[in-house]
Image (spheres, rainbow, N blue to C red):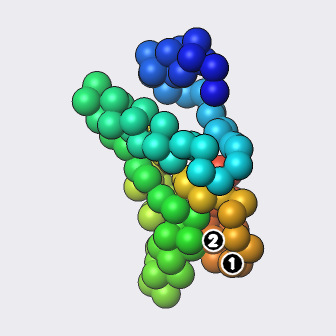
Amino acid sequence: MPAPTQQALRTLEWITRREDLVVCGPSGTGKTFFLEALGQQAVEAGMRVAWFRLEDLGALIRAHRTDDDVTRAVTRILRAELVVIDDIGLLPVATDAAEGLYRVVDAA
C-alpha cells in the first residue's frame, strides 16, 4: 500500500464519514498488521472498535441463533465506529460465517 494512502487512512477521517474500507492482497503482506494499527489508533481516538475473524463471526451467529437473538447481536456489533472482519477469502466459508457477514453488511 503506498505511503500516502496509509497516511490518509491513519487520519481516521474515513471512519467519521462512515466510509467502507476493503484491504486485500496476498497472504503475508501485512494486511492484518496494518488494520490492527488502525484499530488501535481508533481506540486511542476514543472510538469503539469491533474485531472479528470471519469464522468467529460465524460462531457468534450460531451461538445467538439458539436464542433467536441474531439481530440483537448484529446491532451490538454495529455500535462500534469501526468494525473489522478479518480473514475473508482465505478458506472456504461456512454457512454461518457467510450469514454473519451478510447480516453485518446488510445492517450497516
What secondary structure is marked by label 2? helix
Q: For mark 2, what is the residue?
A: 97
Residues packed near mark 2 inside 10 Å, few (<14), some (14 to 19) or many (20 plus)? many
Indicate which disc residue 94 carries: 1
Q: Residue at x 44, y 16 (%)?
A: 11
Compare residues 27 and 69 and report the one nearer the observer.
27
| 29 with respect to 93 (left or right) | left
User: Alpha carbon of mark 2 to alpha carbon of mark 1: how far?
Assistant: 5 Å
In this view, 53 is above or below 32 = below
Residue type at mark 1? Ala
| 100 with respect to 51 (left or right) | right
Q: Looking at the picture, how far across and down is residue 73, in whole percent? A: 45, 64
> Residue 68: in sight, yes or no?
no
In this view, 87 is above or below 59 = above
Count of numbered badges drawn on the protein: 2
Indicate which disc residue 47 carries: none
- Residue farthest along the front direction in this orientation: 28
> Residue 6: in sight, yes or no?
yes
What secondary structure is marked by label 1? loop
In this view, 58 is above or below 54 = below
Q: Indicate the quadrant containing the N terminus: top left, top right, bottom left or bottom right.
A: top right
Q: Do the residues labelled 2 and 1 touch (CB within 8 Å)?
A: yes
Q: Residue at x 62, y 34 (%)?
A: 21
Q: Looking at the picture, how far across and down is residue 98, in whole percent? A: 69, 68
Q: Which residue is drawn at 54% across and 43% down?
A: 30
Q: Looking at the picture, how far across and down is residue 56, in whole percent? A: 49, 70
Q: Residue at x 70, y 70 (%)?
A: 91
- Residue farthest along the bottom direction in this orientation: 66
Q: Looking at the picture, how far across and down is residue 78, in whole percent? A: 47, 48
Residue 54 location, quadrant: bottom right
Residue type at mark 2? Ala
Residues packed near mark 1 inside 10 Å, few (<14), some (14 to 19) or many (20 plus)? few
